[in-house]
Image: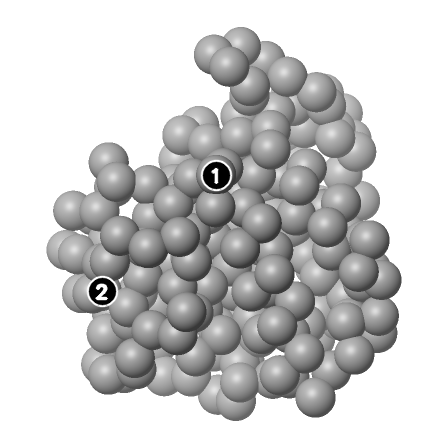
């Protein structure tokens, strides 16, 4: 068991993240008492900050706590991956970002991805055999990666959490807190079939 007030959570994003999909989990997790840090690749739109995307135009900027190269997975209980189209599309071309997703997964940490964020799970090769959801336009990508795609507001499969879009964020944040409280989920094989049932 892990007390959420003792948890440290990493949000990984870059320019073009869907505004609400970073800001709402950041606030909800901090309100619950967790320590939350934001990491981004070195090449960001503004030095030390990344800018969100809202209603078809650039939104607010968020301070970045560290570069991806500075992340030590052992310091964190969970990884959160916001969506937006541009954000995960850029991140999946960053070898360090993909490596971090794989490492969080292998080490039994909670990994939570919303909207287009599951693209990162696909790129890291950790979707196979899992029950997942995502924004509907990438469901074929998720299925082709070997996952069982379902149309549900939040799905948790052995601590891997996915949701579809901003309207699911309340359930998404609640599930992150629940899964962190359960503690480390133990070593997870990557690229193997898991056969886990989705838990609502």
- The tag earlier along the polypeptide, 1 or 2, is 2
Quadrant showing the N terminus: bottom right
- Residue 146 in view in this figure: yes
Q: Residue at x 42, y 84 (%)?
A: 188
Q: Residues within 10 Å of mark 1 (few under 14, many from 20)?
A: few
Q: Name the residue under label 1.
A: 167
Q: Which residue is drawn at 59% across and 13% down?
A: 58
**Residue receiving disc 2:** 147
* Residue at image point 49% right, 37% down: 166
- Residue 127 is left or right of residue 54, and the answer is left
Q: Nearer the viewer, mark 1 or mark 2?
A: 1
Under tag 1, what secondary structure? helix
Q: Is mark 2 on a helix, strand or loop?
A: loop
Q: Residues within 10 Å of mark 2 (few under 14, many from 20)?
A: many
> Is 144 left, or right, of 150 in this rendering?
left
Q: Tell me if residue 130 comes above or below residue 171 in the rendering.
A: below
Residue 140 vertical placement versus 184 (above, below):
above
Judge by depth and name the residue closer to the eye, 151 or 97. Answer: 151
To which quarter of the image does residue 5 belong?
Answer: bottom right
Whether residue 68 is visible = no
Q: Position of residue 106 (x, y in %)?
A: 47, 78
Residue 103 coordinates in the image, percent (x, y)? 52, 70
Q: Quadrant of the C terminus?
A: bottom left
Q: Viewed as shown, does residue 133 lie left or right of 43?
A: left
In the rendered structure, the answer to whether residue 147 lies left or right of residue 92 reads left
């Amino acid at each position: 068991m892990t007390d959420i007030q003792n948890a440290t959570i990493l949000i990984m994003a870059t320019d073009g993240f869907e505004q609400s999909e970073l800001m709402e989990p950041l606030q909800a997790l901090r309100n619950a008492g967790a320590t939350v840090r934001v990491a981004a690749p070195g090449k960001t739109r503004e030095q030390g900050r990344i800018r969100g995307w809202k209603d078809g135009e650039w939104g607010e900027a968020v301070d970045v706590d560290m570069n991806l190269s500075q992340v030590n997975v052992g310091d964190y209980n969970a990884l959160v991956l916001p969506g937006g189209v541009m954000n995960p599309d850029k991140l999946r071309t960053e070898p360090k970002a993909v490596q971090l997703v794989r490492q969080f997964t292998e080490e039994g940490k909670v990994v939570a991805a919303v909207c287009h964020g599951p693209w990162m799970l696909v790129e890291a090769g950790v979707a196979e055999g899992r029950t997942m959801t995502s924004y509907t336009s990438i469901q074929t990508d998720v299925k082709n990666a070997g996952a069982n795609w379902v149309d549900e507001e939040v799905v948790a499969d052995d601590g891997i959490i996915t949701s579809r879009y901003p309207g699911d964020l309340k359930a998404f944040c609640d599930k992150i807190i629940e899964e962190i409280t359960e503690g480390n989920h133990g070593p997870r094989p990557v690229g193997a079939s898991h056969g886990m049932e989705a838990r609502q």
